[in-house]
Image: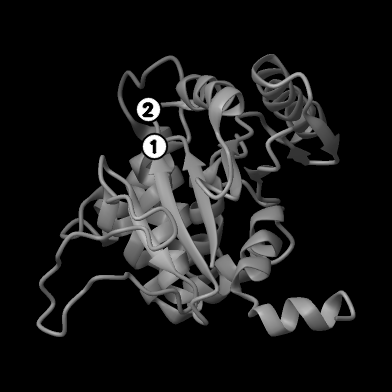
Amino acid sequence: MRNVAIYVEGYHDRAFLKGWLLHRGWQVPGRRKSGRKHAIVNPVTEKEVEGGRFAFSSPHDSTFLELRPMHGDDLLLNEIGRLARRVTPPDPDEIVVVLDVDVDGTQLADGIARREQSVNARLLSGDPGTTRSGSSWALSSGVLVHLALWTCESEDCRGVPDAHTLERLVSTAIKSVHPERAEAVQAWLDARPAPPPRRTAKEHSWSYMAGWYADLGCDAFLSNVWDDPEIAAALENSLSTSGLDAILRGYEQTREQIGEQIGE
């Protein structure tokens, strides 16, 4: 069984990915039929999954995956550098780093390049033997590291944050299904008395949450947005060309499927 760790910036990314993984058919291990939980143990390392981490097994049990939230991109990048110095397979076999690009469309190419350079620098500082191929790296220990970025194109940005972030992706999906909600969100944001001088992408996403999903709260909103079939389809369409979608599809393959691809 492959052992994978996905590092994300925070709890909101963790919530969104939880919803996406469950939507794709991944399972939460250790859940009893009554719905009550007991401690989850990583079957590869035999270590308990704790400290805010979520665990999932792929549809064919070929991959055990942990979502590991950090407290911001700087801490995440520093953690990646620290891991490069000491991590050895199978704890874990592969690491996925998921980050916002945090720039608008006019700067997207430069923003992606900066993120790649930041990851590259951290890994090389921890392990000078690291080799790179595109947005993936191989540590000298044999652990693979992949970078995936939250980006989302949108022709009309009313009701959608400018910066390429998870919030932009979610807002764009909701807008594609409910354009009237996007117009209402933008109108409210524009009409605020004395708005803060610095706008953030979360202003949009939390406006959708407060307007139509207030009973859920922030985390559940990002997980349960996948429960709406139309919004889920829009999200899948946006994510279908992302690096993370391709990575997850690889983790969902059985050993037999992998063997067929390489001609075994």
Please state the horizontal and vertical placement of residue 132, each as a whole percent of the image: 83, 35
Q: Is residue 159 visible?
A: no
Q: Rate crowding at label 2 as few (under 14), some (14 to 19) or many (20 or more) other CA atoms within 10 Å.
A: few
Please state the horizontal and vertical placement of residue 250, each as a whole percent of the image: 68, 68
Rendered image: mark on residue 264: none
Q: Is residue 90 visible?
A: yes
Quarter of the image holding residue 111?
top right
Q: Is residue 8 left or right of residue 216?
A: right
Instruction: Identify the secondary structure beneath mark 2.
Output: loop
Q: Is residue 181 above or below residue 120?
A: below
Residue found 26% across the figure and 58% down from its top: 220
Q: Earlier in the sequence, mark 1 or mark 2?
A: 1
Residue found 55% across the figure and 74% down from its top: 62
Number of labelled discs? Answer: 2
Instruction: Identify the secondary structure beneath mark 1.
Output: loop
Which residue is nearer to you in this view: 126 or 228? 126
Asked whether the beta carbons under mark 1 and mark 2 sit within 8 Å of each other, the answer is yes
- What amino acid does circle 2 point to? His
Label 1 to label 2: alpha-carbon separation: 5 Å
What is the basis of the colouring in this image? Answer: one colour
Rendered image: mark on residue 10: 1
Which residue is nearer to you in this view: 116 or 263? 263
Quarter of the image holding residue 101?
top right
Viewport quadrant of the C terminus:
bottom right
The residue where tag 2 is placed is: 71
- What amino acid does circle 1 point to? Gly
Q: Rate crowding at label 1 as few (under 14), some (14 to 19) or many (20 or more) other CA atoms within 10 Å.
A: some
Q: Is residue 32 left or right of residue 196?
A: left
Please state the horizontal and vertical placement of residue 17, each as a whole percent of the image: 45, 57
* Residue sitting farthest toward the right: 263
Q: Is residue 68 left or right of residue 108?
A: left
